[in-house]
Image: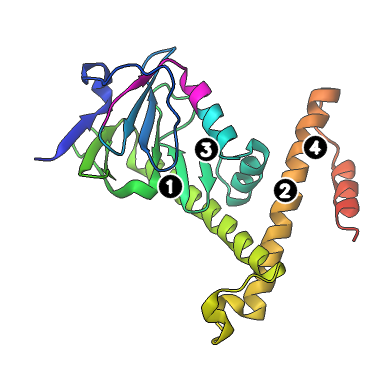
Amino acid sequence: MRKKIDLMELHRLAIDGEPANYQVRWDNILLIAAYDQDRTFILTTEGEKPVLKRRLSEVLDRFAEENSIHSHEMGALYDLVGCRTRGYIAGHHRLVPTCGRSNNQVVYYMVHFLDDAAELIDDKRVEMLLRGKNETYHVQVNTSYRTFRRIVGAADDVAKIQLQIYEYCRHQYGKKKQEDIHERTYDSDYCVIQEHRRISEKVLMATILHIVEIAYEETYGEMIALEFVERLKRVINRF
C-alpha cells in the first residue's frame, strides 16, 4: 500500500512529537513545511513526522548557515539562470520550494530524493514521489505543475553551474581522478576546462556585484549607478 500524504490536510496528520532540537540535514529530510505561524512540520527519510518549535524561516536560515549556503551566492546564481524563486543548492544536494517563497502553502523538498512528479488532473495540484529509506511517499502539494517544473529546472541549472565550478577547481589545484592518469577524459579537454573557468569567473563577478548592489542601496537609498558597476567590474578584472 502506498504512503499518501496530502499537505493540504497537514493538521490531520498524526505527528511524532515536538522535539526540542532537531538538526535538518541533506540526508535525513524529505520535506519541510510551515505547520502554523510558529512551528515547522518535517517528513524524514525514515517516515517520521515531527513538528519543530521554530518558524519555517528560522529552520531554513539555520539549515543554510550549517551547510554554508550563502544568500548572495544563491542570488547571483539564480540571476544567471533567470529565476526569482530560489532554493538551497549545493551541487547534487538541492532543497527547493514548490512555489513562491511568500506563498503560505509553500513546501520545501529535497530534489535528490524525488523519483517522479505528476499533475493531479482533478484539482491541478502536483503529486510528488519522494524516496524514503524504506518506502516511497506520494506527497500532494498545492502548486501548478508548470510552476513546479520551472523551479526544479532552475535548481538543476544552478547545480550544473556549481558542479562545473567544482570541476574547474579540481583542475586548477591539480586534483586529478585516478582514471585521468591513464586516459584523457572529456572533462579534461582544454575547451571544457576553459568553459568551466569562464563560468567560475562569471559567478564570482555576479556574487560580488550582488553584495555591492545591496550594500549600496541600503547605504544611499537608491539603485547603484551603472557607471559605478562598470568601474567595479574593471577593478575586479585587474589581475
Helix, strand or loop at mark 4 = helix
* Mark-to-mark CA distance, 3 and 2: 17 Å
Query: Where does the C terminus fall, quadrant-wise?
Result: bottom right
Q: CA distance from mark 4 to mark 2?
A: 10 Å
Asked if the residue at tag 1 contacts the one at tag 2, i.e. Cβ–Cβ closer than 8 Å, the answer is no
Q: Is residue 57 left or right of residue 49?
A: right
* Left-right relation of 203 to 38: right
Residue 85's disc number: 3
Label located before the other in sequence (3 or 4):
3
Residue drawn at the location 60% of the way across and 65% of the way down = 167
- Magenta residues, start to end: 48-59
Image location of residue 162, percent across then percent down: 58, 55
Q: Amino acid at mark 2?
A: Ala
From the viewer's side, name the closer residue of 171 and 153: 171
Location of the N terminus (image quadrant): top left
Image marks 1 and 4: residues in contact by CB distance under 8 Å? no
- What percent of the width, then of the height, locates residue 42? 35, 28
* Residue type at numbered disc 1: Val
The residue beneath circle 2 is: 206
| Disc 3 element | loop
> Given the image, on which type of amino acid does mark 3 rest?
Thr
Mark earlier in primary sequence (3, 2) = 3
Q: Which residue is mark 4?
A: 212
Marks 1 and 4, how far apart at CA: 28 Å
Q: Secondary structure at mark 1?
A: helix
Q: Residues within 10 Å of mark 1 (few under 14, many from 20)?
A: some
Q: Which residue is mark 1?
A: 152
Residue 106, horizontal then vertical, whole percent? 40, 28
Indicate the quadrant where residue 187 lies: bottom right
